[in-house]
Amino acid sequence: MKKILSVVLALVLVAGLSAAALAAVDTSTWTFTPTDTDVVTFKVTYDSDIVPKETLSFTSTPADDNPDSTNVTIDDVTVSGKSNDVTVKLPSYSKVGKYVYTIKMVEGDTQGVTYSKESISITVQIVYDYENSCLKVFEAGITKDESGNKNDTLANTYEYLPEDVGALTVKKVVKGEYGRKDKLFDIKVTITTETDLKVWSDITVSGGSDAGNTQTIAGDGWTGSKEINIKLADDETVSIKNLPAGVTYKVEEDAKHLSGDINSDEGYTATYENDEGTIAKDTPVAAVVTNTKDSVIETGIALDSLPYIVIGGAVLLAAVAVLLRKRRYEED
């Protein structure tokens, strides 16, 4: 019995000495510095296979009884599917203890979306790391409720509204004896709206031989005008798709093709079909720009008539000579 008591007393003594040794360590400057792996993730979901084009933001509020006001950071998330991962990055810590954060989604204004008003709770436990003389994360994750469950998802609902869109094609036609069929003509298409557009699909441009014709114009909300610059040669067509119904359009050829001497590389005349109007739902509009060039060298004499004029003149001179010769013969 005495031996057992001696062992217990020895253990108590050792523990006391260890505690004293630990108490002597200065931990006031110890900190925790996060790495790229020191994160907590949760999800934002949508209830539709079709998801909106939007970027989500979040707020984080530290609990009042946290050791200090240190807060986490959350990157914005661009929606890419029904389920989207959200990354919560841990900060640097200088105090041990339990930190709790309440995270909420910032309500957006995308048409058709009902944003979750629920919150995600995250708990981070910071402890001493005596081996490395610093602080470390003992535990970090979604906070569990009294039943041991945890909410790791914010669920949005989305009512997909079919877009009211139309399309516009622009075709180039070159006419005239001196019109160059291989020449690329610069054309500007101006799309204008007076209201803030909310569309899900990007406006796409494609067609023609010029690589620069292939373009994508973001379908996010915008007000005012957008310009689409294209190049077309004879019998080429560019298609502009997913134009919101109600916007107006105008097709204009660069003025440089219509100016200059008629015998230069420019100097064309232009006529238009459906060059301006309003886009209607499911009703494609076909605009045509026709350039004509019949170049003439301005000498006052048409080259194609010159041989006949020369022949006529020669015949006239011959007739005059015959008449003069006949008159002289009669006088003699």
Image (cartoon, grey):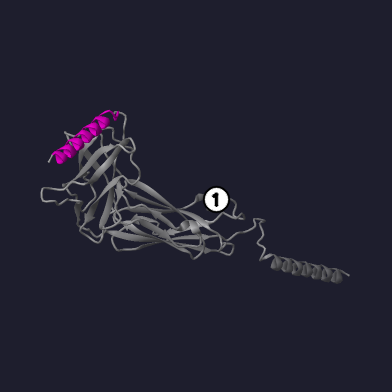
For disc 1, the marked residue is 259
Instruction: Specify the farthest residue to the front.
Output: 2
Q: Is residue 324 above or below residue 51?
A: below
Q: Residue at x 26, y 60 (%)?
A: 50
Residue 231 visible in the picture: no
Q: What residue range appears in magenta?
A: 2-27
Q: Please tell me which residue lies in front, 298 or 291.
A: 291
Please, what secondary structure does the residue beneath circle 1 have? loop
Q: Image quarter for residue 266? A: bottom right
Q: Residue at x 18, y 49 (%)?
A: 116
Q: Please tell me which residue lies in front, 225 or 324.
A: 225
Q: Is residue 319 toward the left or the right of residue 108 in the image? A: right
The 10 Å Cα crowd at callout 1, few under 14, some 14 to 19, many 20 or more, is: some
- Residue 163 located within the stretch drawn in magenta: no
Q: Is residue 311 above or below residue 99?
A: below
Q: Amino acid at mark 1?
A: Ser
- Residue 15 located within the stretch drawn in magenta: yes
Q: Residue at x 36, y 60 (%)?
A: 241
Q: Please tell me which residue lies in front, 13 or 27.
A: 13
Q: Is residue 99 above or below residue 316?
A: above
* Residue 298 coordinates in the image, percent (x, y): 64, 55
Q: Quadrant of the C terminus?
A: bottom right
Q: Residue at x 25, y 56 (%)?
A: 83
* Residue 77 coordinates in the image, percent (x, y): 30, 48
Q: Main secondary structure of the magenta part?
A: helix
* Residue 207 coordinates in the image, percent (x, y): 45, 62
